[in-house]
Amino acid sequence: MMHGLIPDIDVKTLKNLSNEEKVPILGPMVDMHNMSPRMKQSLAEIGKTITTWPQLASSVVLGGAMVADTVRRILLGQLTASGRYYVDFEQIIK
């Protein structure tokens, strides 16, 4: 699952795990080593001061735009390099 980043686990089992138990399983997918310090702090607050994974609407819209642009370029044959890319707006725009 997720290009081998997530171990083979039953979805029903995953639903019954606590947030703390999910972190080691889902951690490779979100690449916690490259996660912003602010996001790492937010993860510790899930179920305490926030109810779920934090997502600001502006970040969701920007993510959707990046995916749409990338898919368009792949379909037009303009993007052929495979890989994983990181965009941290706090690093780009300070």
Image (cartoon, grey):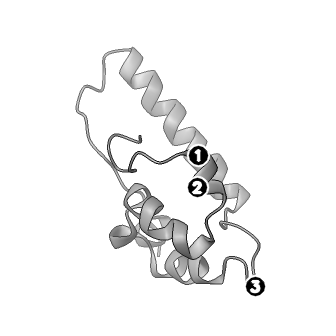
Judging from the image, what secondary structure is the residue with disc 1 in?
helix
67 displayed left or right of 53: left
Q: Secondary structure at mark 3?
A: loop
Q: Which x, y percent locates residue 44?
A: 58, 83
Q: Residue at x 37, y 60 (%)?
A: 28
Foreground: 73 or 11? 11
Q: Give the mark, 1 or 3, whose residue is nearer the N terminus.
A: 1
Where the N terminus falls, by quadrant?
top left
Residue 14: give its label: 2
Residue occupying image coordinates x 53% and y 31% = 68
The answer to whether 43 appears left or right of 51 in the picture is: left
User: Disc 1 residue type?
Assistant: Val
Quarter of the rendering containing residue 33: bottom left
Question: Which residue is at the front of the view, 84 or 61?
Answer: 84
* Residue toward you, 63 or 43: 43
Residue under the image location 65 percent in, 83 percent down = 45
Residue 84 in the image, given as x and y percentages of width and height: 31, 47
The residue indicated by pointer 1 is 11
Q: Earlier in the sequence, mark 2 or mark 3?
A: 2
Contact between marks 2 and 1 (CB within 8 A): the answer is: yes
